[in-house]
Image (cartoon, rainbow, N blue to C red):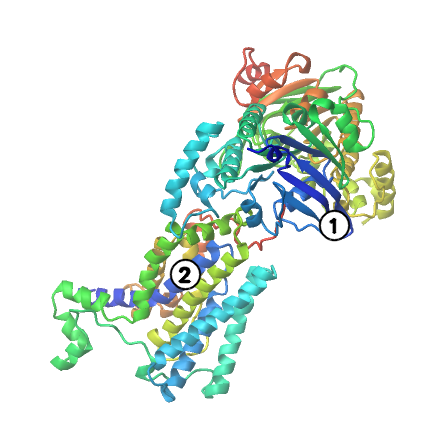
Amino acid sequence: MAAPEQTRPAIELKGISKAFGPVQANKDISIRVMPGTIHGIIGENGAGKSTLMSILYGFYKADAGEIFINGTHTEIPDSQAAIKAGIGMVFQHFKLVQNFTVLENVILGAEDGGLLKPSLAKARGVLKHLAEEYELSVDPDAKIEDLSVGHQQRVEILKALYREADILILDEPTGVLTPAEADHLFRILEGLKREGKTIILITHKLREIMEITDTVSVMRRGEMTATVKTAETTPEQLAELMVGRKVLLRVDKVPAQPGRPVLEVENLRHVDESGVERLKGVSLDVRAGEILGIAGVSGNGQSELLEVLGGYADATGTVRVNGQEIPLSGPGSDGRARRHGGIAHVPEDRQHEGLIMPFYAWENVGFGYHDDPRFNRGLLMDNAALQADATDKMKRYDVRPPNPWLPASSFSGGNQQKIVLAREIERDPEVLLVGQPTRGVDIGAIEFIHQEIVRLRDSGKAILLVSVELDEILSLSDRIAVMFDGTIMGERLPDETDQTELGMLMAGMTGATQSRSQGAGHA
Amino acid sequence: MDFATILQVLDSTVRLATPLLLACLAGLFSERSGVIDIGLEGKMLIAAFASAAFAYYFSQNPVAGIGPIWMGLLMGVLASLAFSGLHGLASITFRGNQLISGVALNFLASGLSVLVAQSWFHEGGRTPSLPDEGRFDGIVLPGALGPADAEAAGRPLSELIAQANPIQQIYSELISGHSILVYVAFLMVPATWWVLFRTRFGLRLRAVGEAPEAVDTAGVSVTALRYGALVIAGVLCGLAGAYLATGLQAGFVREMTAGRGYIALAALIFAKWRPWYALMACLLFGFLQAIALRYQNIDLGAFTVPVQFMDALPYILTVVILAGFVGKAIPPRAGGDPYVKER
């Protein structure tokens, strides 16, 4: 290969701009990605990373700017053109047909002729070859819906490689993976890099950037703020570039002073609508002044645990709050009863369970307080009182903008979460259930939300934290329980464990130590 | 019930199942592509009217070289295609609600057919009875007894068949003697299966009804695929409607589809959106209609099952089936959702 080939960027974007109505998603962005490298793009939610990549993949058309692929000026009006230019994309939410086989998904759109048989046979051969070359083995005849998330992601990568992509874009690829799966993915990416492929990794996780990329570009509010060699930077510096100010990456907290058990759960079982047992005898307790973190890959019963404790799914077993047993089905087991019984809940799915998006902020802050005499005048609601109360809470919880007359949908993810937190924490609960507190939340807001949770702990409340972010679990929890397949695999102290051990437990592999709560469950 | 009667009931089962089958397969193509098609009824009805009206017109004003029935069939299919196009425009291009669009088509067909029929023919919203050249004849398969044999023997055909050996009886009564559209309908079943599961178009069609975003990111147009499916659905509904007015009966009467479009939809759910199951489901519904037609009052000794009950039976069964009596039917996942590009 001639020398100039080496120095020519695989992708060069010049002055890309894109606006959605009044929102400028990308402002005059220029970037050069060298061939055979892993190039990270990092930025907060809404910084414009995904928009930029969607332009590169032909999903959106840029208002201005030019794209060069391997030095050639290229127009990318649609995905077909992107594929032709050798670009493959692995989306955050996979674009797979669930009830198709792996083979069918791979050939979809890249068939060789009108009949399927020859295409399927060819793809089977290519897949075998790719599997050997890149640790990408997947059963070609398996249905997608039967595959683990990690394997589904491999199918997405295979799809791109089958189309002979030289440039692979991955959008938040590790969000849904266990640590072991993420490690495997990184090995695959290293292998692809060795073969000369160019990889763009979009993520908000600083650790991944530091671990695998060669170069990293930082985006903030639609602008490219810096492009640096990964080896020459630090996570702290990147965080500052992302947010625009210094950010505390670790949670600042004093050791917990746990008191008596406030929430006691014994042998909790829950069967969902389709007859699958989601909770298979979960036992745990949370003490006053303590944060118990539940780690696990999503879909292993954590959501159901929150739903049962929050009062919107039935279960069998025993749950006590301050020694008082609470009903798990029938009358007195609904969310309202739970809240009166001292359990507040910040649900995982903020936009569907935590808020009513088209309703005003003050209405959202007021949910669950409708029977409170403070906000009632005879038969009528005292809306003025609700509005005043909401204004006050929004100020204290740093909701920006602090305007109660905006619909919930017009706040950013972090500020929506602050609205929910304000509502739930201000009930002064005995127990706070928190699901995915910082999912889709900017780094700046994460800091605030973590501080509020720790503050509540320090005031002697019991907190049950569910998160798929291991970093969050490790830094926030005083004690960690790992859930897998509807059971508690074991409990660990954050100082005495690490990502690797928790990752093993999350994948269902029992460690050496006997799980405390499973023992209790069988007793 | 003797052998000949059973054969006659089965024979009329085949005839009555034909429009259901064509409409059901139309729905299958449409819904497999992710477009709910509640407008089957309307498309059939407008096709029935157009085919009868033009078959009549061309039988009165013949065009050399082409039979009026074929002109009728063509116009029926075109009318149905136009309705399909409207459905596509509303629900694919403008991302409107597919149910509303389909219901609107049904109302439009119901009103438009009668209005135009009255304005053209002044017979109270119906077309004049079609002469023989405006209707589809039965096709006598090689070796089967047909009207020609009856004429030669000077006896009614039914008598002739009844006296033949059982295999000849089945062949002549049940298999032979139907109009071409019946054979087309039944051949459409393996054809549909083959297209869906053995061709590139079929793979993409099934994919676009399950996960349009996967099709889009693979560089294939969701819109073009869905329009393609609607075109096929339009042609099949056109055939169904034309068969009703020019095969099963001799002319158009108001609301002559009588809910067959909805029954076809029920059959589609019953069949879990699969072609061979669709054949079974449509034969079952056709059989119930044949029974109702033949046995207006069934005397059970203690009491008589009234004719109204027999007539209602196919519809009652539809309700039972739609209530989930047949177990879980999983529709195409993206059914009913207009496709909006998302990151």
Q: Between residue A390 and residue A98, name the one nearer to us.
A: A98
Q: Residue at x 36, y 46 (%)?
A: A117
Image coords of residue A122 (percent x, y) = 39, 41
Q: Between residue B180 and residue A270, name the one nearer to us.
A: B180
Q: Is residue A152 left or right of residue B193?
A: right
Task: Respond whether the residues carrying marks 1 and 2 are from the same subunit.
Answer: no
Q: Which residue is mark 1?
A: A19
Image coords of residue A44 (percent x, y) = 73, 35
Helix, strand or loop at disc 1? strand
User: What amino acid is at disc 1?
Assistant: Ala
Q: Residue at x 31, y 76 (%)?
A: B136
Q: Which mark is residue B206?
A: none
Kindly report the distance in space between the C-alpha atoms of the residues bearing marks 1 and 2. 46 Å
User: What amino acid is at disc 2?
Assistant: Cys
Q: Which residue is mark 2?
A: B24
Q: Quadrant of the C terminus of chain A?
A: top right
Helix, strand or loop at disc 2? helix
Image coords of residue A358 (percent x, y) = 73, 49
Image coords of residue A434 (percent x, y) = 70, 30
Q: Is residue A159 above or below residue A215?
A: below
Q: Is residue A176 left or right of residue B37?
A: right
Q: Residue at x 44, y 82 (%)?
A: B126
Q: Quadrant of the N terminus of chain A?
A: top right
**Residue B301 picture quarter:** bottom left
